[in-house]
Image (cartoon, coloured by chain):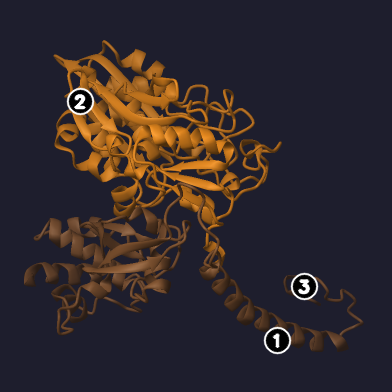
Chain colours: A orange, B brown
Amino acid sequence: MAKDMMTRFELYQPADIAGALELAGKLGPDGWLIAGGQDSLDWFKDRAKRPGAVVDLSRIESMRGIRETDSGLEIGALATVTEIEENTLIKSRYAVLADAASRVASPQIRNVGTIGGNVCQDTRCWYYRSGIDCYRAGGSTCYADTPEGMNREHCLFGADRCVAVSPSDLAPALVVLDASMVIQNKAGERTVSAQDFFIGPDTDIERMTVIEAGEILTAIRIPNTWAGARFYFEKVADRNTWDFALVNVAAAIQVENDIIQDIRIACGGVECVPRRMSVAEDIARGSAKNEETARLAAGSAARGAVPLNYNHFKISLLENLVLRAIRDS
Amino acid sequence: MKDPTTYFPGDSLNEADPPGLSAFRSSRRAFIKGVIASGAVAASSGYLLSGCAPGEGPAAGSVERLISLNVNGRIRRVDVLPNETLAMTLRYKLGLTGTKLACDRGECGACTVVIDGMTNYSCSTLTHTVGSRSVRTIEGLEGPDGELHPIQQAFIDELGPQCGFCTPGQIMSTVVLLERNPKPTRDEARRALSGNLCRCGAYDHYLNSVMRAAEVI
């Protein structure tokens, strides 16, 4: 037990975004922002990360709540995963997001963990999480991509020195809903599409999102574009609770007269970012929504995959999930 | 042949040199036991008390150490470190040891408490983030004369627990389930308790207890 006590840090609880930004700027690399803390505290307890100061964002009221706007929905970054799961507007218009929320972690973690934290959480590669000096931690080795490396959970696509994957269940849902992420910094506000929010190791190997030091994800906006479409979400994991996805799939499909008018599919657990199934979308768009189309499109899902020693199973898993997403949505 | 798995640094690898080895082993065992006992005491008191010395004030703008917590309907004044979890505060500062610490990683549910009507892992909650919200622990369930809460009684009547270590957490999850959904189906109950591990595997017994509690409440 004693080994789990976190190292000392100062704790700041700003009441507004301006205060938080000022602290983030002042503390620099010694500071660490937490919301629900469900990812951060594990890092501190393992002593893999030892910030000198922690900024608790949970008192910032303006980052809470789920609001209807003219162009869709605005979700405060501090909205908990349980709030997403139970919100009637989200359930009726963007069911794929509520479904994804219902599969995150465990009830207790959903009650505390936030949507902002869920999309900003760090990858689960255990070599990296154990605090060793891999590429992602600033070193010069990937321990997962070696002949002996245990890489059953690692990536099929986009490896560049690092083979870690996107752990989030909400991220693929936000990508198919074409959400935009609202990021604030001292200069003001910028918005980035969910698709571009996540970055791979080829862009920056030490972080998973475009958020720079001194910036805060404050809200997520979901446009009306896909409201009420047909949706599909499925997560495959070793355990039904707590576990991260081996592969998950989110899909939004607009159907008229049984013809797929438009479609977006994204998968987690196969690349460092939620992977758009662009070729499968192109094949399915304009075709009848049936088993045959689903099979044809799903056949393209794993094209270009480069499996590691222990994750070949993800290829057929990915293809099957894309097939079901198109056929069963 | 010497079993390589029992090799310790300092052991002689020379097979012709056994006489001193057994003596060395027994003394090493005693030494390790001594380290565990004294080290654990030194470490835990060090962690709990580190930073408690007068004069070690917080940095400007950092949280105040002396805070009020609303626990089981009582306001408790308590000195809390910035890096202290609610489970530590409840168990080691307030003496509420009904809340258990097992994994300390938000992966087992033994530390489940209720904060403002929602279940939380108290091992994964910084005490300072609780603020003015109300905390409810297993100690807060019994009636004024010490009679058991109907949910606790149902868990006894249905022989829910086996070893009992995860039971406080299972009961706190049940409290919230029945507040939000007084007549759950067995599947809804299973889902509500899915964030609580039971290493004895007494899940069906716990579900029997939840379903009985739902009948009597």
Quadrant of image for the C terminus of chain A: top left
User: According to the image, label 1 marks what residue?
Assistant: B30
Mark positioned earlier in the residue sequence (1 or 3):
3
Q: Quadrant of residue A180?
A: top left
A268 or A323, nearer to the observer: A268
Alpha-carbon span between mark 1 and mark 3: 17 Å
Q: Secondary structure at mark 3?
A: loop
Residue B200: in sight, yes or no?
Answer: yes
Which is more foreground, mark 1 or mark 3?
A: 1
A220 or A229, nearer to the observer: A220
User: According to the image, label 3 marks what residue?
Assistant: B7
- Label ID, residue A71: none
Q: Is residue B83 left or right of residue A144?
A: left
Which is more foreground, mark 2 or mark 1?
A: 1
Alpha-carbon span between mark 2 and mark 3: 62 Å
Dot 3 amino acid type: Tyr
Q: Residue furthest top?
A: A286
User: According to the image, label 2 marks what residue?
Assistant: A230
Residue A276 location (% of width, % of height): 40, 22
Dot 1 amino acid type: Ala
